[in-house]
Image (cartoon, grey):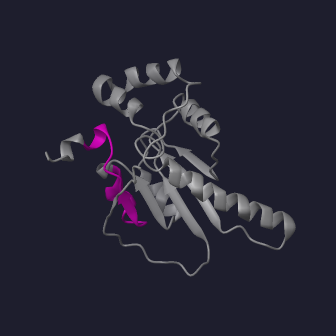
Amino acid sequence: RNLPAGRVLPSQYVEEDDSDLRIAFDFDGVLADDASERVMQEGGLAEFHAYERANAVTPHSPGPLNDFLREVNRIQRREDLRKIQDPSYRIRLHVSIVTARNAPSHQRAVASLKAWGVTVNDAFFLGGIDKGAIIDVLKPHIFFDDQQTHLASTSLAAPSVHVPFGVANQAFATPG
């Protein structure tokens, strides 16, 4: 069985005194495969958007942390049931997607989540806006991304994990 791994980067994160758990994920190359990222790297933004429009209803193949999200969702469903049984219970587990995707490519990401049977509390389709600004507001306890360039700003606000997967990391791969 493939078990994903990542490298936790140094962070200036200061833990808040709360009992919540907030997890944030990038989409391509983390929750989903990197097929679309490959199109982007090889053909540019216009070709990426054309590819995503043509495949809008075709779910992505799962990426390295997809199974982890499924298990987190299992815990969230248990929390939802507890909230139904005990209205005073406060949901503590919160999941977000923070991705560089924007319209119209967000449609395929949403279709993929539905096809996989997973949910998130929030999804931010940033279209080039720095992820660090969103991570600073969300204050996740951990953020997973496959691109080191995105993690430079996010690691200032939250523990950030580089997931060394796919085309975005081929330049960093060592023979071997």
Q: Quadrant of residue 79?
A: bottom right
Q: Residue at x 31, y 57 (%)?
A: 152
Residue 158 is inside the magenta segment = yes
> Where residue 65 sits: x, y (%)?
46, 50
- Residue 20, relative to residue 96: is it above or below? below
Q: Nearer the viewer, residue 78 or 138?
A: 78
Q: Nearer the viewer, residue 162 or 15?
A: 162
- Could you tell me if residue 122 is visible in this image? yes
Q: Residue furthest left?
A: 175
Q: Quadrant of residue 158?
A: bottom left
Residue 131 is inside the magenta segment = no
> Where residue 102 sits: x, y (%)?
50, 35
**Magenta-colored span:** 150-169
Determine whether, in the image, residue 112 is placed left or right of residue 148. right
Q: Residue at x 51, y 56 (%)?
A: 24
- Could you tell me if residue 132 is visible in this image? no
Q: Quadrant of residue 89?
A: bottom right
Q: Nearer the viewer, residue 70 or 95?
A: 70
